[in-house]
Structures are given as structure tokens and as C-alpha cells.
Image (cartoon, grey):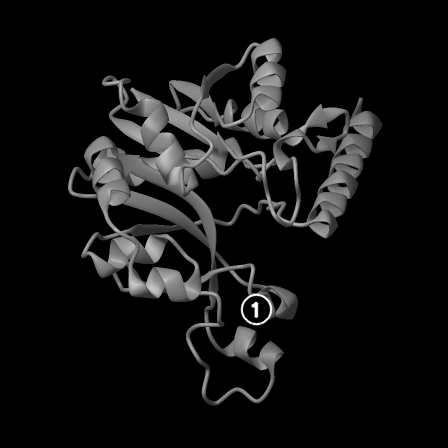
Amino acid sequence: MILGVIPARFSSSRLPGKPLADIGGMPMILRTYESAKRSKLLDDVLIAVDDERVFEVVNKHGANVKMTPKDLPSGSDRIAYAVKNLRSAKIIVNIQGDEPFISGRMIDEAIEPLLFDKSIQVSTLAKRIQTVSELKSASIPKVVFDYENYALYFSRSPIPFVRDARTNLEKINKAEIYKHIGLYVFRREALFKFTSLEQTDLEKTEKLEQLRMLENGMKIKIVVTEHESISVDTPEDLEKARNYFKLISKGKNENT
């Protein structure tokens, strides 16, 4: 079984109560759930929560939900806890709960390499950076990868460093610079190996948990996507998401 799991942590320092933040009359966690359900390759979607209020909302919606401890250190740990007794889940997709408009096609793009190559244990998504604001934003991780599309490094700083570029715009135009989209696909064994590892030095420095995999020799396959997603980490991001929903809703209404 290919299982999508959406980890939802209620206490966010930058946006408290984030899973229940309203976007167009629906909590963000349910927007993410409904978006994930559009995947053609997922057999099921599970929401892993740490708060009774979120559990109640999700359960009332009819979604598959599991309560997890509040003190788990990361979304990946929350997912591992939620699926430890689901032995039939052989491929597990970590779908970030703050991606309310994640495309089903993006999820499928990330899954596909594991279906065609049994040696691939982990995959994730990247998209070419198009704007200077994305390049400069420390909240948008960047990734560089080799000729076989395996990750070499992730950083909050712009990588690679474009030595001959005089401006940020010139950097974007001269080099292919990619942002990392935090959707992960794990084979079951790889997920439990990853979550059993201690935090590493680079992970602590950059505050990027995927570096733990690289520092321990785990390979991450990068899938380049043309699709875009909106990550909600701050009140400003939430306002952008709400405006985006209004825009796409207006488009749908005009086409009906």
C-alpha cells in the first residue's frame, strides 16, 4: 500500500493553531487533505495529529486520523509513530500539513521513481527558482543535486554560489537554482532508519532535518517539478493562501 500521511502539529511558534487556520471556510489541514486525495497513486491518506481540537475537526470531516504524542520532535517522527503498526504501508508519503494547495500530480511525480527503481529509498521534489525573493528567503530551502538527480546538499542560503553574477537576478538567469519542496516519499525501512538516527551537526546548523539523511549516507532522489505549491508558515503566508483561494474560486465561478 502507498499511504500518504499528513502530520499536523497544533503549536506553531510563528502561527499558533496553524492546522485549524481558516482558508475559504475550511481549516488548512482539511484543505491539504482534500488536495492530497486527488493523487492517483495514493491508496489512502492519514492525518497524524497531536491535539484533540484538530482530531475532532478531522474526524467530523470523515478523514482517516490518528492521535500522536505532543512531544515528538518532527513531522517525520509523527508519521513513523502513526504507521508503525500499519504493516501494509510499504511506501509512505510525508505530505506537509501546511501545503493546502498541494497538487495531486506533484505527489504522484514524487512517488513514481520508487515504483520504477527498487534501489531508490527516498525521494523529494525541487522546482527551479524564478524570483529574487525566493532566492533570498531563508524560509525556502535550496538544493543542489548530481547528474543522476541525487541530492548533494540542502541549505537555507542560495546554492550554488554564482561567482560571475553581479546581481541576484543575474544569478537566477545564469544558473539553475532550485528550491526544495518538502514532500518526501519513503520506503518503510528508510523512514524508520531515518527517524532512529540522532540529529546531526549540519541538521542543527541549518535547521533542515533532511541533512540528517545525507550525513548518514542515505541517498535522496530529486524529482524536478514544474508545479507550484504554497507553504504556510507565517501570518503573511496565511494571507497569501487566502488570497490565492479567492483567486482560484473566482476563476471557477467564472467558468461555471
Q: Residue at x 33, y 65 (%)?
A: 202
Left or right of residue 111: residue 7: right
x, y (%) of residue 120? Answer: 21, 43
Which image quarter is the C terminus in? top right
| Residue 14 visible within the image | yes
Q: Is residue 197 above or below residue 72?
A: below
Q: Residue at x 82, y 33 (%)?
A: 250
- The total of numbered circles placed on residues is 1
Q: Which residue is mark 1?
A: 135
Which image quarter is the N terminus in? top left
| Residue 145 visible within the image | no
Q: Residue at x 52, y 24 (%)?
A: 38
Q: Is residue 216 above or below residue 156?
A: above
x, y (%) of residue 143? Answer: 40, 62
Tag 1 secondary structure: helix
Quadrant position of residue 113: top left
x, y (%) of residue 204? Answer: 38, 61
Left or right of residue 210: residue 52: right
Quadrant position of residue 75: top left
Q: Residue at x 57, y 47 (%)?
A: 228
x, y (%) of residue 102? Answer: 55, 37
- Which amino acid type is shown beneath numbered disc 1? Leu
| Closest to the observer, 211 or 92 | 211
Left or right of residue 96: residue 13: right
Determine crowd level at label 1: few under 14, some 14-19, many 20+ residues with C-alpha closer than 10 A: many
Question: Looking at this rendering, what residue extends furthest in the front direction?
Answer: 71
